[in-house]
Amino acid sequence: MAAFRRAAAMGAQWIETDVCLLGDGTPILFHDHTFERTIGPSRKVREAEWAEVRHWRSHLPWDGDPALTAIPRLDEALQEIHRLGLSLNLELKIHDGEGDALVEAALPLLRKHADDGGSLLISSFEHRALEQVREQQTDWDLGYLCAGIPPDWQAIADELRLASFHPEYRSLTAARAQAVLEAGYELYAYTPNRAEEVTDLRAWGVTGVITDDVREFADWKEVFHL
């Protein structure tokens, strides 16, 4: 959660992060399918339990409070995000076919967050996960993550009642960006980390970016921070 505090201190209004499911059914904020790259143990996320994960710390450099490098449960993170006054773009990260279980574990916590006034956008690469959320939450904003916006994007948007598309930034073309924006959807591109990488996207009117470095995009209309 160290990045959340830093993003808030730098003026970011939104953050983007991933939620996935441990083997014991605990939803945590974590990106990878194993803990090896950032934590050390070569365990799969779906094989670990909260009783052990709660003691692990990231070995990536951080110049703040070491306690902030712990892996948070979703409920802990939502409390901190609410305290910081940040809006949340939460990606449902599915590693081994556990999408239904992840949605069922996360939704009660997200409902409480929304009921407490938290601003929320749910995104995923997994069509079924978004479909499951939409079946239970008719009024939430949903975002469709994709390597590139597919040819049948309008049908997907209609089916899921999407608010936005989130394509890989190098995949976008001017024509596709114009079509999506003119149809009334927001468009957030991932994951450029230098402003010069997305000069064209800005000219095309892309709504914002999902980035590791919020400093590069401070003057955009809306910036998400990884």
Image: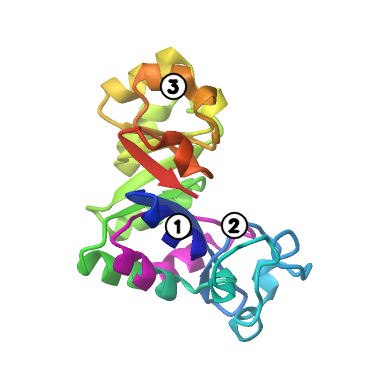
- Can you identify the residue that label 1 sits on? 6
- Residues packed near mark 3 inside 10 Å, few (<14), some (14 to 19) or many (20 plus): many
Q: Is residue 10 visible?
A: yes
Q: What percent of the width, then of the height, locates residue 31?
A: 59, 57
- Can you identify the residue that label 3 sits on? 201
The residue range painted magenta reads 79-107
- Can you identify the residue that label 2 sits on? 31
Q: Which is more foreground, mark 3 or mark 2? A: 3
Q: Please report the residue visible at 41 percent of the width from the left and 29 percent of the height from the top.
A: 153
Do tag 3 and tag 2 residues touch (Cβ < 8 Å)? no
How far separated are the C-alphas under marks 2 and 1? 19 Å
Q: What percent of the width, then of the height, locates residue 67?
A: 56, 76
Q: Amino acid at mark 1?
A: Arg
221 left or right of 226? Answer: left
29 left or right of 174? Answer: right
Q: Please report the residue visible at 30 percent of the width from the left and 31 percent of the height from the top.
A: 185
How far separated are the C-alphas under marks 3 and 2? 26 Å
Residue 113 among those drawn in magenta:
no
Q: Amino acid at mark 3?
A: Leu
